[in-house]
Amino acid sequence: MKFSLRTLFRLLALFILSTCLSWWWFSGADMGWTKTYVTIPATDDVTGIQYEVKKEKFVPGVDFLALGTGLSFVIFATTFLFSAKNPKIQQR
Amino acid sequence: MKIQALAVAALLSTQAFADEVAFDFKDPKGVNNIVFKLDAPLESISGTTNGISGIISADPAEPEDIEGKIIVDARTLSVPNPLMQEHMLGAEWLDTAKHPEITFEIKEVLNSKKEGNTGTAEVKGIFTMKGISKEVLVPVSVTYLPGRLADRTGGKVEGDLLVVRTNFQINRGDYGIKQGENLDKVSDVIDISLALAGAAPKK
């Protein structure tokens, strides 16, 4: 199967866009900023104090989505710089 | 006669302090927490801290007889977004390098009511943040749990617990934190919720 450099970059842009979008979506489509931890509510048995236990977890937010979308658009835009006569790349 | 009067006064003052217990609010279990929330039109920020210490002396029989100071290590304030946290602790906002402590010092207890082991009151105190001190009045609920420290320490340490809860608001502008700036994203009003347990081990 043969791809031009232009097609290859367009596929890369599509891959980045779909990866970012699906990662964000399946992580709960958080409309806030990206988080590096989440909190789990807990209650102290003796005092009755409610507190939050931190658990390290990457939750992509809208900034992550914007960055991924932006990057894919930049890569897509650069494909217009390639002429159709660019050498073909052999893909195995 | 004069010596006798002095002796009686000394005895009375000793008696007055005899029932006062010092509760240490440095909690090795990490349960003590403060939650802060800022709800601006464009953005809602919520964070916590466990970096709490301080001593409160209280007489469980006299709810108005309470004094002490709660200290928060400002560098332990955290929000889930690392970039936001860096900005929050940075020189433009809290400037924790120069002002590493946020404190609340109890000055006066007003309108106290007692029901069983729990008391409620309005506490007048000095709240200090980013080097600026302001007098604030906060509603406080205090629960005295005699002999319950052993339950928290697996029987290793005997003693009493004092649970303090409060919710109050401050304005960041009053404490020199970007007064009037970025109000669409960072609310001027900060909602603060404290739930703290202090321990008084028996000697």
Image (cartoon, coloured by chain):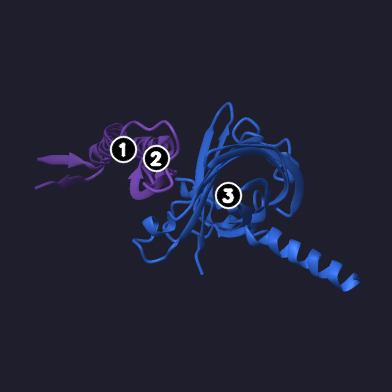
Tell me the chain of label 2: A
- CA gap, disc 1 to disc 3? 26 Å
Q: Residues within 10 Å of mark 2 (few under 14, many from 20)?
A: some
Closer-to-camera residue (B172/B182):
B172
Frontmost of labels 1 and 3 is: 3
Q: To which residue does mark 1 refer?
A: A20
Residue B150 drawn above or below residue B36: below
Image point (42%, 31%), residue name: A31
Labels 2 & 1 near each other (Cβ < 8 A)? yes
| Front residue (pair A78, A58) | A58
Image coords of residue B65 (percent x, y)? 69, 50
- Under mark 2, the amino acid is Phe
Q: Residue furthest bottom?
A: B3
Mark 3 and mark 2: span between their CA atoms?
18 Å
Inspect this view and state whether residue B96 appears.
no
Give above or below for A90 relative to A61: below
State which quadrant residue A66 falls in. Answer: top left
Q: Is residue A13 left or right of residue A4?
A: right
Chain letter corresponding to the colour blue: B
Q: Which residue is identified by label 2?
A: A64
Q: Secondary structure at mark 2?
A: helix
Left or right? Give the position of B67 relative to A7. Answer: right
The residue tagged with tag 1: helix, strand or loop?
A: helix
Where residue A21 appears, as percent x and y from the top left, is: 30, 33
The chain containing the residue under callout 3 comes to B
